[in-house]
């Protein structure tokens, strides 16, 4: 059976919300019983986002099979609650590399290699793999960037060809665009949308639906104008005003009738009715006033919050599960080294140190770990956050003054974090890390085991350096527990302090497996510990206030 294809293109500006829209519609279709595949096609020449700066591309989202992918795949997994594979994200770099490799091998028999048909055929082949591997009834395909970008033209042409090859009745184009608001006149303008649709039609694609995004309410007259000038049915122009709750988007898309219109246009039938009660409850909970827990997030890229998108969402998921609201204090680790930003750390109920690469800001992260350890502040370290926790312990508890990771100081006499043996001869940066899903055995009686409630877990990794087992016994004798290990006992996965309310570091990235209605146990553990820290602090203050004045002054 030929699968149906729903193609998402973007207009006017990038970051307009195509990924969230695709994820929301995917959830709507899944709730109706359809089997889905989801793809993000990125037109940039990089092979994958793995070596790209977080400032340019946001976080790198890692899948079970180790694929380093676009952050939109995080939206797909969190909304639709599916586990994606490498086929769900490919780039122009991968396409060109594949075609060039075939040409060098002689597969084209000396022919001239061109964008059409060689590049477009490879793009279509990869799109077809998504449906083939998952046996999907519907394939959702998002094209990165904006209509009019030079690098996206081969992708647009491929999709135009695909529509003709599988039949127009099997392809539905959704154009997600932005309506700018001119504050001087109080007007919402449709002209940029008209131009983006004109650009799309000039390459042979006419949208079946336009989703018009705006920060302000969109009147019916605006939708009428878009329908008229863009040659789209009035019912297919969907106004989508920005919401303050991310997880309300599926409900808004449902209320707008998007799923029903798409299903009718593609001539398919749902097998069940969606149940939106859990999502309505979730949105209601988000909007319900709650006590605030302050979490200081100490990172290297905090100017660009999308660099920690999954971490931020995982904290929100954990907050909902513990009936609090999380207030994130963004702290640049470089500032801590300059004696700035410490007021956020000192006023925090919990500290989270996420991953990162390179030596910049490492000392600031290590200082944050030391503060959490010495002041008994709940702490969660992710990947590099676990490593700096071990570096601090080695320096200030074990008194190895020179302790460091060999990533940052190759000459250190105490490389408590060191390169994996199998990686030492590799020089290429891309794809050389421990990537993807690996098992982890948990030690009974530890805070980690209590948080998970099971004896073995599987978590997603993205790192090149490991804890150096030469120091393992020394760490354990001083009070560090290695509460999670690889099944062969060779790799430290989780470290925690025995005499601390909650100080846990994971070598993996738990944020990638957190879901709105299934928060990750380690994030829940951090927020619970931070919530308890607030209560304990209030009790101490209350007790102190009731003491006699003379005794109180001695405390």
Image: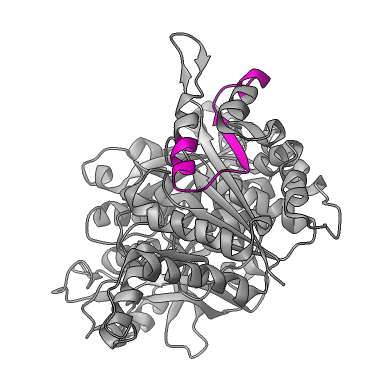
Nearest the viewer among 182 and 331 is 182
> Is residue 345 visible to us here?
no
Residue 207 forms part of the magenta stretch? yes
How many numbered callouts?
A: 0
Q: Magenta region: which residues?
A: 196-222
Residue placed furthest toward the right: 272
Question: Residue shown at 29%/63% (left/top)?
Answer: 396
Q: For the point 38% across and 83% down, which residue is it?
A: 473
Residue 264 x, y percent position in the rendering = 78, 49
> Which quadrant would residue 251 be assigned to in this image?
top right
**In the displayed structure, would residue 223 be above or below residue 41?**
above
Q: State which quarter of the image contains the N terminus.
A: bottom right
| Residue found farthest to the bottom | 488
Residues 545 and 93: in front is 93
Residue at image point 37% right, 48% down = 298
**In the figure, is residue 230 to the left or right of 380?**
right
Residue 352: image location, x then y, percent:
45, 52
What coloring was used for the rendering?
A: one colour
Name the residue furthest left: 411
Give 441 or 66, whichever is nearer the viewer: 66
- Residue 207 visible in the snapshot: yes
Up/down of 212 relative to 9, above or below = above
388 horizontally vs 515: left or right: left
Residue 294 in the figure: left or right of residue 304: right
The percent coordinates of residue 168 (x first, y second) are: 64, 56
Q: Is residue 171 magenta?
A: no
Pinpoint residue 339: horizontal percent, then vertical percent. Answer: 24, 40
**344 and 279: which is toward the camera:** 279
């Amino acid at each position: 059976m030929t699968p149906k294809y729903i193609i998402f293109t973007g207009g006017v500006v990038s970051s307009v919300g195509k990924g969230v829209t695709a994820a929301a519609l995917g959830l709507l279709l899944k709730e109706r019983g359809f089997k889905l595949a989801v793809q993000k096609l990125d037109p940039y020449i990089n092979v994958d986002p793995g070596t790209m700066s977080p400032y340019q591309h946001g976080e790198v989202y890692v899948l079970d099979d180790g694929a380093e992918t676009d952050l939109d795949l995080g939206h797909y997994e969190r909304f639709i609650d599916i586990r994606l594979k490498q086929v769900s994200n490919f780039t122009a770099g991968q396409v060109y590399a594949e075609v060039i490799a075939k040409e060098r091998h002689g597969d084209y028999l000396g022919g001239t290699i061109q964008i059409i048909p060689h590049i477009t055929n490879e793009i279509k082949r990869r799109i077809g793999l998504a449906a083939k591997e998952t046996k999907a009834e519907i394939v959702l395909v998002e094209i990165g960037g904006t209509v009019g970008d030079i690098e996206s033209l081969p992708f647009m042409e491929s999709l135009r060809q695909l529509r003709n090859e599988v039949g127009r009745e099997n392809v539905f184009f959704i154009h997600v665009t932005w309506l700018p608001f001119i504050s001087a006149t109080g007007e919402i303008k449709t002209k940029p949308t008209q131009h983006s649709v004109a650009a799309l039609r000039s390459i042979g694609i006419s949208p079946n639906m336009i989703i018009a995004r705006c920060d302000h309410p969109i009147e019916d007259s605006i939708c009428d104008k878009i329908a008229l000038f863009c040659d789209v049915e009035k019912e297919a122009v969907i106004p989508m005003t920005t919401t303050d709750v991310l997880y309300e988007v599926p409900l808004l898309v449902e209320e707008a009738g998007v799923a029903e219109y798409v299903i009718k246009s593609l001539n398919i039938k749902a097998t069940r009715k969606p149940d939106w009660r859990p999502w309505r409850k979730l949105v209601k909970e988000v909007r319900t006033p709650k006590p605030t827990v302050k979490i200081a997030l100490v990172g290297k890229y905090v100017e660009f919050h999308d660099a920690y998108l999954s971490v931020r969402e995982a904290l929100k998921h954990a907050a909902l599960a513990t009936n609090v609201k999380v207030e994130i204090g963004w702290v640049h680790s470089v500032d801590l080294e300059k004696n700035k930003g410490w007021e956020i750390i000192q006023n925090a109920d919990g500290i989270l140190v996420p991953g990162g690469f390179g030596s910049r800001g490492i000392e600031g992260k290590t200082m944050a770990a030391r503060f959490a350890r010495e002041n008994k502040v709940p702490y969660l370290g992710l990947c590099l956050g676990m490593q700096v926790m071990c570096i601090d312990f080695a320096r200030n508890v074990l008194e190895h003054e020179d302790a460091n990771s060999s990533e940052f100081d190759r000459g250190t006499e105490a490389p408590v974090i060191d390169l994996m043996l199998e990686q030492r001869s590799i020089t290429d940066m891309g794809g050389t890390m421990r990537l993807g899903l690996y098992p982890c055995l948990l030690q009974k009686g530890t805070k980690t085991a209590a948080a998970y409630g099971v004896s073995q877990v599987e978590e997603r990794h993205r790192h090149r350096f490991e804890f150096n087992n030469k120091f393992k016994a020394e760490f354990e004798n001083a009070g560090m527990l290695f509460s999670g290990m690889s099944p062969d006992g060779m790799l430290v996965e989780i470290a925690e302090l025995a005499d601390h309310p909650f100080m846990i570091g994971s070598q993996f990235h738990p944020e990638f497996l957190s879901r709105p209605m299934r928060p990750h146990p380690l994030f829940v553990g951090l927020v619970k510990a931070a919530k308890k820290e607030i209560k304990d602090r209030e009790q101490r203050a209350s007790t102190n206030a009731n003491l006699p004045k003379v005794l109180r002054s001695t405390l």
